[in-house]
Amino acid sequence: MSAPIGIDELLERVRAGYTRVDAREAYAASRAGALLVDIRYQALRERDGLIPGALVVERNELEWRLDPQGSHRAAQATGHDLQVVVICNEGYASSLAAASLHALGLHRATDLTGGFQAWKSAGLPVTPA
């Protein structure tokens, strides 16, 4: 059995498996057809607003909704080649979520560095919840 690791090391390991995007890159990707997926919980969405066009999926449902082979998949989960940008509040939970999507074969999944807060700070579109 290997020694346990902390969350900081785990994040470093999973983030090494893909290239993260900043807010402007996420916006450009969405304009080019990438699926933005907002995994923030409802209270944060109500407080801070929504990214127009983003698919809202609670974190505990993410794998079921984005698995292209799953019986509970979202209509947007069209295939394993789908480019997905996962967005949480500050860019931590989304890294673990992106790694989980990679494990399902969604090899183009990534996450937004700094999360929704970085999106909002960059002055990108936000609508009230």
Image (tube, grey):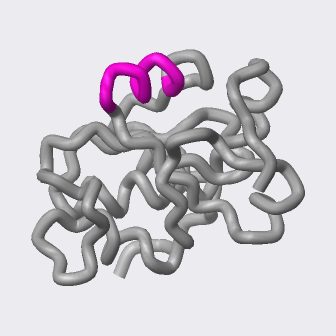
Residue 32 on the magenta segment? yes
Residue at 52% in and 23% down: 27
Q: Quadrant of the C terminus?
A: bottom right
Q: What residue range appears in magenta?
A: 26-33
Task: Specify the principal SS of the magenta part.
Answer: helix
Q: Could one spot residue 17 in this view of the protein? A: no
| Residue 60 percent location from the top left of the image | 50, 79
> Residue 82: where, in percent of width, then height?
21, 43
Residue name at image x 61 percent, y 24 percent: 23
Q: Residue at x 82, y 62 (%)?
A: 46
User: What is the quadrant of the N terminus in the image?
Assistant: bottom left
Looking at the picture, how far across and down is residue 90, in whole percent?
Answer: 73, 46
Q: Quadrant of residue 43?
A: bottom right
Of residue 61 and residue 90, the one placed in the foreground of this image is: 61
Horizontal side, residue 17 vs residue 60: left or right: left
Against 77, is 117 above or below?
above
Horizontal relation, residue 20 to residue 44: left or right: left
Q: Where on the picture, by quarter, is residue 19?
A: top left
Residue 8 in the image, given as x and y percentages of width and height: 64, 53
Residue at 26% across, 81% down: 72
Of residue 104 and residue 120, the one placed in the foreground of this image is 120
Front in this rendered view, residue 85 or 128: 128
**Vertical order, 114 against 26 (above or below):** below
Q: Is residue 116 visible to us here?
A: yes
